[in-house]
Amino acid sequence: LASAEPLQYCPIQDVCYQVAVPSSSASSNSGNIYLQLRAPTSYSWVAVGTGSAMADSNIFVMYQDGAGNVTISGRTGTGHTMPRQNTNAQLELLEGSGVTNSGETMIANVRCGNCGAWSGGSMSLASSDTSWIAAWKQGSALDSSDAAATITRHDAHDQWTFDLTQGTVASDANPYVGARQFDNNNRGGVGQGSFADPGTLILGHGIIMAVVMVLMYPLGSALMPLFGKWILHASWQFLAFLLMWAGFGLGIVASQRIRLDFNSTHTILGTVVVCLMVVQPVLGWLHHRYFLKNQKRGVVSYGHVWYGRALLIMGVVNGGLGLQLADASRTFFIVYVVLAAVIFAIYIAAAVFGEFRRRRQSRGPKNF
């Protein structure tokens, strides 16, 4: 039974995607399907694609052409690089496309003649469970009619599923002209996307891990030589240890959401550092027991100190790799490096001060 209207999914406010499948296409599993991409003109581009990840996805990108209309560009996903143009895509802009609403909205009503199959895969036009992805980038208009125009890295993206059997329309014609206007804030009853923006998860991961690796761990290490109170040092570092795992958890969720997994140096090195950090509290406890018994440092003591320093250096370097992976601005890099350098200087000063004090008091009572 054919439905009267397309399916809609809006991953964020005012950025919406619609899909409709004519009954003739659904029954033959070939032929036309209809897409609509709708977004404010404050976006440089928006895109929708088939599948659950960028790699081999059949992607459709919309951007302004600079003449009051929009360009629809068929592309093939290649992973975490700019999708390349798919010249085999049979796309046609239909009535209702263009820049509307006093220049505030861009719309692409699209007929796709071969969206059931492409070089990277296929999609059943009568499936009750089809995967879709979307991405968007705010910024200045591209103002290009070139379907192969360069697009910059997206701000964020999302994924969801459509039940195409609920988006079957009777006529093989533009279903968007004269149709009911959907609420731009309605995420869609069939779409099953993840509401949490991966960009937000990545930002949270980055902030927590930077605070832990650049601030908390080094300052916690400086507490011991400055104040000589092991309980203060241990409590501070334990709090940092818990926050580290929270940040790592956010990173795992974010990497799964964007299908990054262990395909980058940042994720691999970060996982190694976090796992190796589990040994550090054990070394700290062994050092504490050794010092209480022998009133001096031993091999385990120096192991605790230098093992921790090595992990800190690896953690800070990995933070820089994370900024690079997230395509952070030069300003972020500068702030990160300067902050790390300042904290490093504080730590070195505290370590030197502590060493002088330890030598002065080497014959006095010990409290560690």
Image (tube, grey):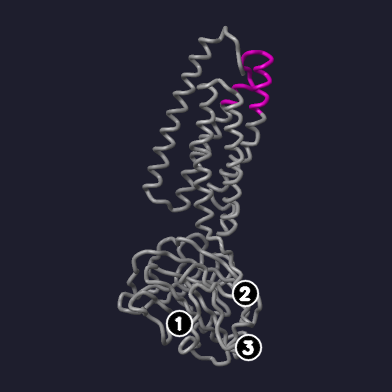
> Are the residues flagged by discs 3 and 1 in contact, CB closer than 8 Å?
no
Sequence-first disc among 3 and 1: 3
Q: Residue 124 location in percent, x, y?
A: 63, 79
The residue lying toward the viewer, choosing from 281 and 256, is 281
Tell me how far mark 2 sits from mark 3, CA to CA. Answer: 17 Å
Q: The residue under label 3 is which amino acid type?
A: Ser
Q: Residues within 10 Å of mark 2 (few under 14, many from 20)?
A: some
Q: Residue at x 53, y 82 (%)?
A: 114
As for residue 245 lying within the magenta part, the answer is no
Q: The residue under label 1 is which amino acid type?
A: Asn
The disc label shown at residue 130, or none = 2
Q: Residues within 10 Å of mark 3 (few under 14, many from 20)?
A: few
Left or right, 164 with reference to 47: right
Residue receiving disc 1 = 109
Q: Residue at x 45, y 75 (%)?
A: 38
Left or right, 179 with reference to 167: left
Q: On the rendered image, what quadrant is the N terminus found in?
A: bottom right
Numbered marks: total: 3
Identify the secondary structure beneath mark 2.
Answer: strand
Identify the secondary structure beneath mark 3.
Answer: helix
Residue receiving disc 3 = 28
Q: The residue under label 2 is which amino acid type?
A: Thr
Q: Nearer the observer, disc 2 or disc 3?
A: 2
Residue farthest bottom in this picture? 171
**Residue numbers of the magenta segment:** 283-305
